[in-house]
Image: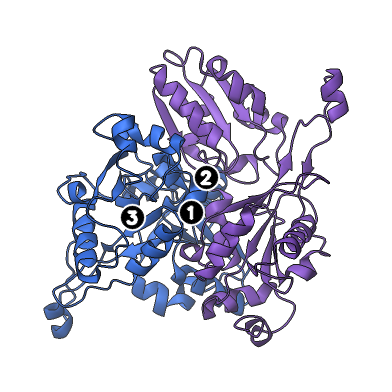
Chain colours: A purple, B blue
Amino acid sequence: MFYLIGLGLSSVKDVTVRGLEAIKGCKRVYLEHYTSILMSASKEDLEEFYGHEVILADRDMVESQSDEILAGATEDDIAFLVVGDVFGATTHTDLVIRAKELGIKVESIHNASVMNAVGACGLQLYSYGQTVSLVFFTDTWKPDSFYDRVKENRDIGLHTLVLLDIKVKEQSIENLMRGNNIFEPPRYMSISTAAQQLIEVEQTRQEAAYDENTMCVAVSRLGAPTQSFKVASLKELAEYDAGEPLHSLVIVGPNPHDIEIQYMAEFFDGTKEELKACFNK
Amino acid sequence: MFYLIGLGLSSVKDVTVRGLEAIKGCKRVYLEHYTSILMSASKEDLEEFYGHEVILADRDMVESQSDEILAGATEDDIAFLVVGDVFGATTHTDLVIRAKELGIKVESIHNASVMNAVGACGLQLYSYGQTVSLVFFTDTWKPDSFYDRVKENRDIGLHTLVLLDIKVKEQSIENLMRGNNIFEPPRYMSISTAAQQLIEVEQTRQEAAYDENTMCVAVSRLGAPTQSFKVASLKELAEYDAGEPLHSLVIVGPNPHDIEIQYMAEFFDGTKEELKACFNK
């Protein structure tokens, strides 16, 4: 059996009881280690909690060496652990398709992910449109296809969850060219960087998907004990220090419901009435 | 402390290790018992697994007697258990707002819900639009506001998750009028009923949000060991026996990605090419 097991968002204890039992019975246990990180737990913490060795699986291993991961899974149990829930990333879907081609049984053990836990910020989950991702801009590469998605969402009154880039085990161009096996320290996009990039794209595109006064919810360390939310305009969030990673951002729809405003007001520097006045302009 | 704890989708063991520890330490433990049910576990199963009494909380208790649920939570730990994740329903948001008004600390312990676990059917989570709910139609009450939401989603190429009604502890009009404390057996909307109602609304509205040939994914018992998916047209699903509850439905967007088609083909009565031909017409 090939188990895909969601680990939830933060601590080693966010695994489900069923997931933990499955892990303990597996011959090999891989941890997907490039689309997200478990905020409050290291590889060693996991190994101690599971009583089992954990093999870190980077993008290259998952995408090019999937048969190695799956080796023996027709007889033995193999686990592939994913931070959040198991179907957040396309590459995991590829892995399942490959397993089925090889005649391996697959079982998913689900968990919380940012896609549903973001409900904690008070915006109703059924009022979100499509989710978008924002990658680190460089001087020459500023992909902005997310902009059209945000516009589509806002045109029909919906909130947009913006997932922020993380870079794990990346190489500098110099080290890549020279074939040096040296990796850059991990980087996690902050809310301020995200807000700056969003404003930059609006200034380029100028199609009024949003503007610097658009209200957003800064989501910091969702699911961790230090989780926090901050409701403010993009312009304010461009200067906001949200602390340790991981961060996400919600671009609030143009007309949030009264109960959404009431809930968000707790995270806003002002009264409920002042927050309400930030919408419907 | 007032804990909101997600139970996940199916078995008692779908609770997280952190959630289980919190439950064991609580003075009172409530189970929200009207927006969803845990498929493979009864109240008694939960009580045995937790080693703790579980109080069933129906809609009336949660909406009218919230202060009773919250009583003493400034000193003692109280748990409110929710099937799936904690912020699926608006009434839970109300409960949190009330708790904070009373000066009670609130902590959420998240879990999987249909909103993210539906990724298991192979459609990418970031390509879903707003989620809609479908209620049981009666002869005189056929609410169809979901139709506009589905149209909005499909107009911009997105999938739509359709949550199907459940009726727990409902009274017949006769018993309600007579003040009899007699409740109807629980009812869970099946995929075939949902498909029939969707077709009925399209025939009334005729605004081409979808038609009876629109491809959908029937989602049965998501997260349970007997979980199954079936890819077929609405017309076919109107006759489909999906077995035991709970059921959900995904209306596939008009142009699914190649990898989505490849994954869905496993649940389709035909080849990948035949499935592909069902789109882009």
Chain bearing mark 3: B
Image quarter of residue A122? bottom right
Identify the image quadrant of residue B76: bottom right
Q: Earlier in the sequence, mark 3 or mark 2?
A: 2
Disc 3, disc 2: CB below 8 Å?
Answer: no
Q: Which residue is mark 2?
A: B16
Specify whether residue A229 is in view.
yes
Q: Is residue A237 above or below residue B270?
A: below
Q: Is residue A12 above or below residue B99?
A: above
Q: Along the horizontal axis of the image, is A160 left or right of B243?
A: right
Figure check: A54 above or below A161 = above
| Residue A264: assigned label | none
Q: Residue at x 76, y 57 (%)?
A: A197
Disc on res. B37: 3
Expressed as whole percent of the image width and height from the top left, the position of residue A158 reads 52, 67
Q: Are marks 2 and 1 in contact (CB under 8 Å)?
A: yes
Type of amino acid under label 1: Gly
Q: Residues within 10 Å of mark 2 (few under 14, many from 20)?
A: many
Pointers 3 and 1 within a single chain? yes
